[in-house]
Amino acid sequence: MKIANVSYSLSSQPSTLIEWQNRLVDELKNFVSGGAEIILYPELFLMGLTDYFQGDLVFQMKEISHYVWTTLLPELKKAIGEKDIVLCLGSGPRVVGDKIFNSAPLLINGNWNFQDKLHLTPWETDFIGGTELKIFTFKNLKLATVICFDVEQPSLALKLKEKGIHILLVPSATTDRNGSNRVNRCANARSVELGAVVITSPLIGDSACDLVDHNEGRQGFFLPAQAVAMVEQEQYSSYSADKKVVHSFEVAENLLVELKRQDSETKPYLQRDNHSIILLDK
């Protein structure tokens, strides 16, 4: 299974919205024709569209939401055709009534769906946190998307462990290397805890929008350090702050299935806590 991971740079935006859309369509067609089955963009990738809408931030987010969900997503689905892929279009505003969610549009099994960010950072004051973590099945594998700060929550890992997750997509947006390190170190831990491949995709570059004014990070591709998925297969990209980074990762589907089988190895994701543990504060 080939995975295309795109750390999009907001520093090199096209001059018009239609040019932005055409570039994205062409890029996705190239990924699909090159054999990509999973395509991942970063958190708040769609906030780069503030360059094309005038007004205050809330007005811009409402305009972006309307454009994305009524125009962009149908166009992308039409361009991709009937290909059996997963496309996570990073994240951006999704307006429902008077609420704005930070949501990842997900094209999976031929239909658009979404995953809301559940745990918001202190500066995401215009967003509402989501309440549902969605599990999708793709090629008989269980897949979920957790957005940036969500991957840093051990409570979510416990819930995902119960579902036997195989693939975890982590679009992220961090302002510095500390933030990127937190996301990647937690993503690595989630891979061990869940017995899953975990992929991180950070937003990079600079924007006039205060919410995404400066972004840097590096991509991560993590495996759970088992005999069939050695850590030597893991990959990082270099740090970047101003130039788009595209990497392809590959993982065998039978490897992900094999990870869920019990053998002589220690596999924390197959261990079920069936006894009480008492914490003693002395």
Image (spheres, grey):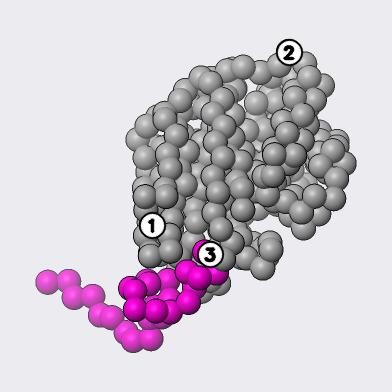
The answer to whether residue 65 of the structure is visible from this angle is no
SS at mark 1 in the image: loop
User: Label 2: how many residues lie within 10 Å, few (<14), some (14-19) or many (20+)?
Assistant: few
| Residue type beneath disc 1 | Met
SS at mark 2 in the image: loop
Query: Pointer 2: what residue?
Result: 15
Q: In which quadrant is the C terminus drawn?
A: bottom left
Residue 90 is inside the magenta segment: no
| Residue type beneath disc 3 | Leu
Query: Pointer 1: what residue?
Result: 230
Image spot of residue 124 (x, y percent): 54, 38
User: Label 3: how many residues lie within 10 Å, few (<14), some (14-19) or many (20+)?
Assistant: many
Image spot of residue 211 (x, y percent): 55, 28
Image spot of residue 243 (x, y percent): 53, 21
Q: Which residues are magenta?
A: 255-282
Measure the alpha-carbon separation of dots 1 and 2. Answer: 44 Å
Seen at 78% across and 19% down, the residue is 19
Measure the alpha-carbon separation of dots 3 and 2. Answer: 42 Å
Residue 261 is inside the magenta segment: yes
Q: Which label's residue is closer to the chain start, 1 or 2?
A: 2
Q: Which label's residue is closer to the chain start, 3 or 2?
A: 2
Query: Pointer 3: what residue?
Result: 256
Q: Residue 28, located in which quarter of the rendered image? A: top right
Seen at 51% across and 48% down, the residue is 199
Seen at 47% across and 38% down, the residue is 219
User: Label 1: how many residues lie within 10 Å, few (<14), some (14-19) or many (20+)?
Assistant: few
Q: Which label's residue is closer to the chain start, 3 or 1?
A: 1
